[in-house]
Amino acid sequence: AQQEARATAHQPAITRDGRQVSIFANIGSIADVQVAVANGAEGVGLLRTEFLYFERATAPTEEEQFTVYQAIAQVLARRPLIIRTLDIGGDKPLPYLKLGIPEANPFLGWRGIRLCLDRPELFKTQLRAILRASAGHNIKVMLPMIATVAEVRAAKEILSEVKAELRQAAIPFDRAIAVGIMIEVPSAVAIADRLAAEVDFFSIGTNDLSQYVMAGDRTNPRVATLVDALHPAVLRMVQQTVQAARTAGIWVGLCGELAADPLATPILVGLGLNELSVNPQAIPLLKQAIAQLSLAEAEAIAASVLQQDSATDVRALVQNLISS
Ligand code: PEP
Ligand code: MG
């Protein structure tokens, strides 16, 4: 099966009845992007930029970041590269950021977009680097940990300022650069219709969404079985998000680990995700699995899992349906 999957890895993922799902890669380094392309990635759905900021005494400069983003975009040629802005803080502190007060609940604390909006210089440096790399490349910006409309507006405002500065300095960038957000906080699901009016795309982060929906720390093994992205509570949130995106006419992807779980494939295709972003190794088998599905059967599977009472029931149901 592995060998067969490798043979079709460079074809698009299309169901038997013609629904195409874009298959992108999650990456966190320059080395990863080579592997992603070799495995058939049609783009990068999540570039985790944190790696640029770890294990150093000061934040990376605009030039350093620009060089890395440009190098990754070059490997991708015209394939899309979705760069997620810094998602640091909480359990991933950086000494040079001087977070100050220790937090009792780091996952509920000062992380991601919250920190970036409070440290506009740090945020602007990254946005300048991303915008400069966007000249001649297919780059999109993605904001993590969005919980409110105000955060999106504030981030877009800062992006506009940076664009104006670049224009004034006659530095080229993609003036039509798309801006999207991660949907990984339950409030964002609840107001997905309002958020959709502000952005070009959504990408659902089920790793964090599961921990916040189930109220269980994603790093705590004691609650690991509770924090399960296949729980119907989480899957219903995915469904709500997809519907809001559809109504608004924007595309919606999913970049949590769930997308690489073979049992999730029919569910996610059936719920109507336009894009799935997974670790590069998972791409060939994911594409092959989609090619074997029909959208009609995937939709039926999705509808029935939403009516289950537990992740265990969801797994059993999908297992039965795909082996029958
Ligand atoms: C997520 O939360 O699902 C996600 C993709 O982001 P990260 O795992 O980097 O928090
Ligand atoms: Mg996340």
Image (cartoon, helix red, strand yellow):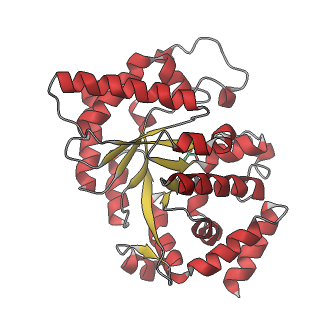
Viewer can see residue 307: yes
Q: Position of residue 28 (x, y in %)?
A: 42, 45
The residue positioned 56% from the left and 62% from the top of the image is 260
Q: Position of residue 142 (x, y in %)?
A: 44, 41
**121 vs 215: above or below:** above
- Near-viewer residue (117 or 296): 296
For residue 150, side relative to residue 162 (left or right): right
**100 vs 68: above or below:** above
- Near-viewer residue (221 or 196): 196
Q: Quadrant of residue 212?
A: top right
- Near-viewer residue (281 or 238): 238
Quarter that holds the C terminus: bottom right
Q: How many discs mark residues in the rendered view? A: 0
Q: Position of residue 13 (x, y in %)?
A: 44, 73
The residue positioned 24% from the left and 27% from the top of the image is 63
Q: Position of residue 26 (x, y in %)?
A: 45, 52
For residue 70, side relative to residue 208 (left or right): left
| Residue at the left extreme of this rendering | 170
